[in-house]
């Protein structure tokens, strides 16, 4: 780990836990904030920086930029809350109870929610109410969709100005039928059988069960690692979920879910990083083992190399008009992804490659039937 990376993690730990900044050297703010932006937590580090005193505080020009970041984060959170409340009220009037997933719900776990970088508003409504919910939400003032039909994909996109919303029939994109068959009962347990309630500035919203929020937040980070690249924002989300729900989790259920999805080794590697890099107390990390250190260090290097939504070296897909080239691209992507994963998790890489090939073959068979 380089000196500037050590400074980045020291500042991130200070942001997560409200602890003093333990850095003796001169902080390379320009490089540190580039890393923070790459990993989706520049709001957290900006908040630490503007409250620092002494010679190690940023230059006035950078401080002004950080203050703008903080102000924009607060305004965006208020705008998202307004849209969220309107959407939930509308759905409830028609007998639909949505469950808040991911971004906005995870921000509530942080001491200051506006510091967590926001993306979409994700609402899970399930299969039965999906079409009705999408139709209703399209009537909200200022909303427009991106042109796709409601029944295409696992979620439906609606844009409210610069605030996107995803309406989910399923909480996760899982193409492999075998994996989906294992995941669906977990989803049903956490989102439909045992959801919880959370307060959003005086407005009560339905959120996942504590176990599902922890599991799904990790699984979402894992999916990022497998596809578009995972950043420290996602790892911080898992860290805060574990911290907030410590002592409230059914650990037997959580272990069953992790084992059923064959994710214990990745869970423990991410866990090692959360304890030893982000400062999560060890007793708050279920199933922690120091034996994961070597794998975790490889994972850390991959996280630093890719970042949040910024996986490097992607293969540009050719036009679908060139069917042979398009199929070759899909095959190359499967094997490229395999080697990318295998550097850290060989067993998981083989399972994912088998699932990808199985999905590709089943899709080909279905296409032949439809021709």
Image: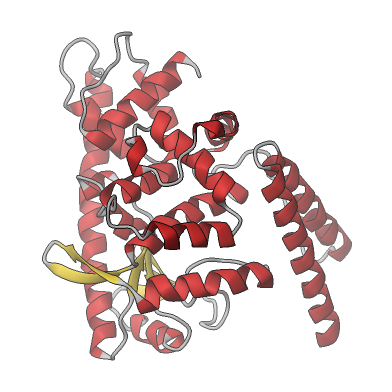
Q: Is residue 219 above or below residue 361?
A: above
The answer to whether any part of residue 146 appears in the image is no
Q: State the image coordinates of residue 258 (x, y, percent, origin top left).
A: 52, 57
Residue found 37% across the figure and 47% down from its top:
237
Q: Which residue is situated farthest in the front direction here?
A: 252
* Residue located at (57% from left, 29% from top): 301
Is 281 above or below relative to 316?
A: above
69 sits left or right of 216 in the view: left
99 horizontally vs 155: left or right: left
For the residue pair 199 and 68, the one nearer the viewer reads as: 199
Q: Which residue corresponds to the image point at 49% horizontal and 43% vertical from the top-left?
A: 308
- The vertical placement of 66 against 328, above or below, is above
Q: Which residue of the protein is positioned furthest toward the right in this rendering? A: 324
Q: Determine which quarter of the picture holds residue 329.
A: bottom right
Q: Nearer the viewer, residue 239 or 88?
A: 239
Q: Position of residue 269 (x, y in %)?
A: 53, 39
Above/below status of 72 relative to 38: below
Which residue lies at the image location 36% right of the left edge and 36% below the top edge?
282
């Amino acid at each position: 780990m380089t000196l500037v990376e050590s400074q980045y993690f020291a500042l991130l730990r200070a942001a997560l836990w409200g602890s003093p900044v333990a850095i003796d050297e001169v902080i390379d703010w320009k490089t540190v904030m580039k890393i923070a932006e790459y990993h989706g937590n520049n709001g957290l580090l900006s908040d630490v920086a503007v409250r620092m005193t002494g010679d190690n505080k940023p230059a006035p020009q950078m401080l002004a930029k950080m203050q703008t970041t903080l102000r924009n984060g607060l305004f965006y959170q208020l705008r998202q809350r307004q849209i969220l409340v309107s959407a939930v009220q509308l759905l409830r009037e028609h007998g639909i109870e949505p469950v808040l997933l991911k971004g906005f719900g995870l921000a509530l776990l942080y001491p200051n929610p506006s510091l967590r970088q926001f993306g979409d508003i994700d609402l899970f409504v399930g299969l039965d109410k999906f079409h009705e919910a999408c139709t209703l939400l399209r009537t909200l003032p200022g909303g427009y969709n991106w042109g796709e039909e409601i029944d295409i994909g696992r979620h439906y996109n609606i844009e409210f100005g610069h605030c996107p919303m995803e309406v989910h029939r399923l909480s996760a994109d899982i193409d492999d039928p075998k994996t989906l068959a294992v995941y669906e009962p977990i989803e049903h347990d956490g989102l439909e059988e045992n959801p919880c309630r959370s307060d959003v500035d005086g407005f009560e919203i339905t959120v996942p069960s504590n176990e599902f929020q922890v599991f799904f937040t990790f699984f979402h980070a894992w999916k990022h690692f497998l596809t578009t690249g995972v950043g420290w924002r996602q790892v911080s989300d898992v860290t805060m979920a574990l911290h907030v729900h410590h002592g409230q989790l059914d650990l037997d259920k959580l272990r069953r879910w992790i084992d059923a999805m064959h994710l214990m080794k990745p869970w423990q590697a991410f866990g090692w990083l959360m304890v030893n890099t982000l400062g999560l107390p060890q007793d708050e990390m279920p199933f922690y083992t120091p034996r994961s250190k070597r794998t975790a260090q490889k994972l850390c290097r991959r996280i630093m190399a890719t970042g949040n939504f910024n996986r490097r070296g992607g293969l540009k897909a050719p036009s679908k008009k060139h069917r042979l080239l398009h199929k070759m691209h899909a095959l190359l992507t499967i094997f490229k992804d395999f080697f990318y994963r295998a550097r850290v998790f060989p067993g998981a890489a083989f399972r994912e490659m088998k699932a990808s090939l199985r999905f590709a073959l089943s899709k080909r068979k279905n296409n032949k039937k439809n021709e």
